[in-house]
Amino acid sequence: MLSVLTVPAFNDNYLWIIHDGVHAAVVDPGDAAPILDALKEHKLSLVAILLTHHHSDHVGGVATLLQHYKVPVFAPRNDPIANVTQPMDEGNVVTISELDLKLSVLEVPGHTLGHIAYVAAEQGWLFCGDTLFAGGCGRLFEGTPKQMLSSLDKLAALPDDTKVYCAHEYTISNLRFALAAEPGNAALTARYKVEQEKREHDVATVPSSIGIEKATNPFLRVREPAIAQQLIADGRTKNSDPITVFAALREWKNNFR
Ligand code: ZN
Ligand code: FE
């Protein structure tokens, strides 16, 4: 039986440890120290490192972890990352035999050009780095709105009960923006209350699920007439073409306080 440990790091990052009580794989270890502490605390031995993209808050701990454990490093082929042993492309499968775990790779460019996500179909887990967030999506540092929208559409096509393990606790500020973009969405209003309650008790709002995101995340809802109408009424876009709506939403969010 596999489970996922949440390892908070920096201000608002989540690093993920997948384990069976003996062996462990880590996703996006931006910092080695909290990972080494968690491995020690839970008496786990690291067997693999999985990376979603090249930003330092996702890869910064890799070199130090490799000093302690000689393990394969899975990472996107098209992002510049040191120490990678297994460059991954769309459709590749990561097999971690110690954990009896298979994860398939999706290319999800937009936040970075090489960004990938890992799907454990049997467990119903998605590790999506900074592509899809609870209530939002990553900034477009390298890709275009068209690329990011098609990446998010790919993730939205996963089963509704897929758990979304994203890499940051940005949920409350994302949902405040979502409410501005789609004030009439009752599921969104309800979710905002639930997630606020969690944060007041210092509980993580992640993982979310694909079903919850499809119902409340404006970046997965660019084909909803209400969202397009809001943007058009505010003068942020002139038409309801999904890519145009997505670009206008992302631009609005970049400046939203
Ligand atoms: Zn990033
Ligand atoms: Fe990040």
Image (tube, rainbow, N blue to C red):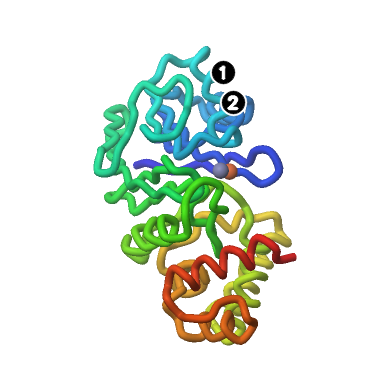
Q: Please, what secondary structure does the residue beneath circle 2 have?
A: helix
From the image, tell me which residue sits under label 1.
Answer: 64
Q: Residues within 10 Å of mark 2 (few under 14, many from 20)?
A: some
What residue appears at the point 56 percent right and 69 percent down from the top-left corner?
248
- What residue occupies the far front of the structure in this picture? 238
| Camera-nearest residue between 3 and 52 | 52
Q: Residues within 10 Å of mark 1 (few under 14, many from 20)?
A: few
Q: Which mark is residue 25?
A: none
Residue 100 in view (yes/no): yes
Question: Which residue type carries mark 1?
Answer: Thr
Residue 41 in view (yes/no): no
Marks 1/2: CA–CA distance: 6 Å
Residue 250 is situated, as x and y percent measured from the top left of the image, at: 57, 64
What residue appears at the point 48 percent right and 81 percent down from the top-left corner?
239
Assess whether mark 2 and mark 1 are in contact (beta carbons under 8 angstroms). Answer: yes
Residue 206 is situated, as x and y percent measured from the top left of the image, at: 54, 55
Look at the picture and state if 237 lies above or below 163: below
* Total numbered labels placed on residues in the image: 2
Q: Quadrant of ligand 2?
A: top right
From the image, tell me which residue sits under label 2.
Answer: 32
Look at the picture and state if 60 lies above or below 226: above
Q: Is residue 183 left or right of residue 211?
A: right
Residue 65 is situated, as x and y percent measured from the top left of the image, at: 52, 20
Q: Quadrant of residue 156?
A: bottom left
What residue appears at the point 61 percent right and 76 percent down from the top-left corner?
236
- Mark 1 vs mark 2: which is more N-terminal? 2
What residue appears at the point 54 percent right and 86 percent down from the top-left corner?
229
Residue 5 is situated, as x and y percent measured from the top left of the image, at: 51, 41
Q: The N terminus is located in which quarter?
A: top left
